[in-house]
Each structure stands twice: as structure tokens, then as C-alpha cells.
Image (cartoon, rainbow, N blue to C red):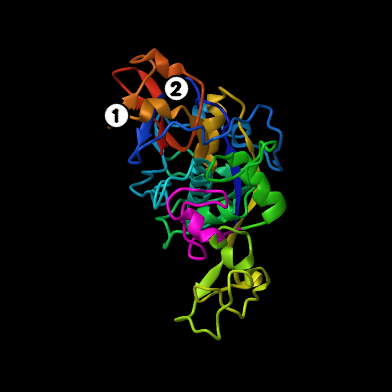
Amino acid sequence: PVMNSAVINNTMSHASTLLLLILCSTTPLLLHAQDLAIPYPPPSSYIIHPLPHHYISEEDLPQTFTWQNVNGNSYLTRMRNQHIPQYCGSCWAHAAMSSLADRIKINRSYSNARRKSCGDDNTNNVHHYLDERTDGLLLGQLSPPPGPDIELSVQYILNCGVQPTSTSHHHLSCHGGSTLYAYEHIHSNLKFIPMETCLNYIACSSESEEGFCPHVRSLTTCQDWNICRTCDGFTTASSTVSKEEQSTITTTQKDQYGCRAIPRGSIPNATILEYGTIEPNNIHAIKAELYARGPVKTSINAKYLLNYTGGILGSDDDPALYNTTHNHGVSIVGWGYDESRDTQHWIIRN
């Protein structure tokens, strides 16, 4: 199956002046700058439909909302750990693929899509809305998520990303990257993202020196067998090729591990229809995008998460949280309201 999805990337260091709630931060964080800064206006975007804040008013948005619980269902895909089986600075890639996979899950869950009629009433609490991108198509009621989830290959982005050089600021590797550049690269150059059943995460890119990465360089190229592969059986001398011959391997041959490439036309994948950013500090635009389309990738300063154990992190508790130097990519999945503070906060998963 080929899935199309619009992707919006919030390039702000902090999503806004709302407070911050981190959801399920289970991975130890190191303070290397993994998520590269992107200016606004962005150097690249491809937006062909009206953004949700142009057709969803602030008054139409609820006081609290999270894709973790809509009518008792979670529309988020699974949590992942970027630092196993060794350290890899790929938060930008995990946040990119996580928010895209979540949006695919959400879009697959809408049922009874139909054209809006004069008698339609959107005043009830069912999560549905008029999508102006589709000429009046009412997406309908959000049904329980269909299964299984479609998970996208983070390793593919590392294998086929732009590698670091002394002059490149657009690299996409274990030494950092940008979600916006990743979306641009997928949309303009790669054209698709294979599902993770094609290619599992090994936390290595071609220049990595951590753990076993130097010993598996052949698994970090963008050759066909490192895009989507399957292993049909145990290796034999007659069915495998050497590392040196792998640059000319065909889909009918097996590599040194007894695996062969899946032909491009048979690869299960997702594609990106459009991508872009949201202007800094436009809370209404971020909320509308979240509510209408799904999670939004953003960047934060991970320093203040190192000892996080739960609850709300608020700048009223620690003014240092206003620090806008970002180094870590995460995904905004909703917002909440805290009565004791009488203010809202973002709900973010790491």
C-alpha cells in the first residue's frame, strides 16, 4: 500500500509560550545537538492546500485534546528508542517518521467519508471536521484504529540521507539532521519511505564509529538491498556475493547475509504529499494543525529533561525553561489544561 500524508514541521525552539508536559520520556538523553536549527521562513516547503488554522477557528478548538486518547482510543504508533543497539543522534529521523506514521494511522481511522450536506451539524463531540483540502469532503467519524500499525523505516532515512561534510548543513545521519530537510529529501529525491518490515533500525549511518557500526558499513549504503530486503533461507556459497560485488547485486542474488533486495515496484511504502513549517508563536496554527491532521514535530532543549520523571514542566517553576536553544527533536501530540496554574500546556512524546 502507498499512503499519502501532509506533514507539517514546527521549527520553533519551543512550541510556544504554553507550558510543557513530556509524555513517556524513557530514553536517557545526551546533550549533543542532534536536531539542526531551521530558520523561519523555511528554506524549503511544499504546501498546496490551505492550512487548518485558516478554516478552524480558535473557538472551535477544545480546551484539552490529545491523540493519545480520542474517544478512548490512542492514535499514536509505538514508542521507540533511538539509542539502541548503540548511540545514534537520530532524534530528527525518529520524530519525523513518528509524526508521519501517526498521521497515517489517523487517516486510516476515518470512516464513512462523504460530502458535506446542508443538514450536517458539527456541534457534537465526535472528532470530525470539514476538510477544505478536499472540496467539502467530510471525513466522518473517527473509528477505532485499524491494525496493524504502519511503521516507517528510520534506518532508510539514515542509509539514504545526506552524509556530513565540512560544508554541508543539510546532513541527515547519526550525527544529526533536520526533519524539514528529511521531508524535503523524501518528497523531492527519494519519493517514498519503506515500511519498517523492509529495513530494521540498527542505529548506524555510513560514518558512524559507535558499537558495531564500523563492521556493518555494507548495511548503511543506499543500494537496493539496503532499502527493502528479505532473507529467504540459509546462505550457501553459490547463492551469495562478496562485499566487493554488492554494488552490482541484483534482486535475484543474495548478499553475504543470504538476503536479497525487494524490487522497487513491490516495496510497501508511504509518500509525502506536502510539507512545511508553522510560524513561531502561532499557538492557534499549531493547535489547528494538530487537531485536524495529527502530531507535529518540534524541537526543544533536552537539557531540562535529563532528570524528568513525570508531570508538567513549567516556566513558572523554572524560568530557565524559557531557554530557546534547541538540540532535540520530539513530537507534539496534543495539549492539556492545568487548573492549579490556570493555563494550558503542550503534550509531547519523546
**Circle nearer the viewer, 2 or 1:** 1
| Residue 59 vertical position relative to residue 191 in the rendered view, above or below | above
> Label 1: few (<14), some or many (≥20) within 10 Å?
few
Looking at the rendered structure, the kind of residue marked 1 is: Gly
Whether residue 135 is visible, yes or no, is no
Q: Position of residue 337 (x, y in %)?
A: 36, 26
Q: Nearer the viewer, residue 29 or 193?
A: 29
Say which residue appears at 38% left-offset and 43% top-offset. Answer: 68
Return the x and y of residue 201 as percentages of the image width and height: 47, 56
List the residue tagged with mark 1. Answer: 311
Quadrant of the rendering where the N terminus is positioned: bottom right
Q: Which region shows up in magenta?
A: 193-217
Q: Which residue is mark 2?
A: 18
Say if residue 20 shows up in the picture. yes
Q: Secondary structure at mark 1?
A: loop
Magenta stretch secondary structure, dominant: loop
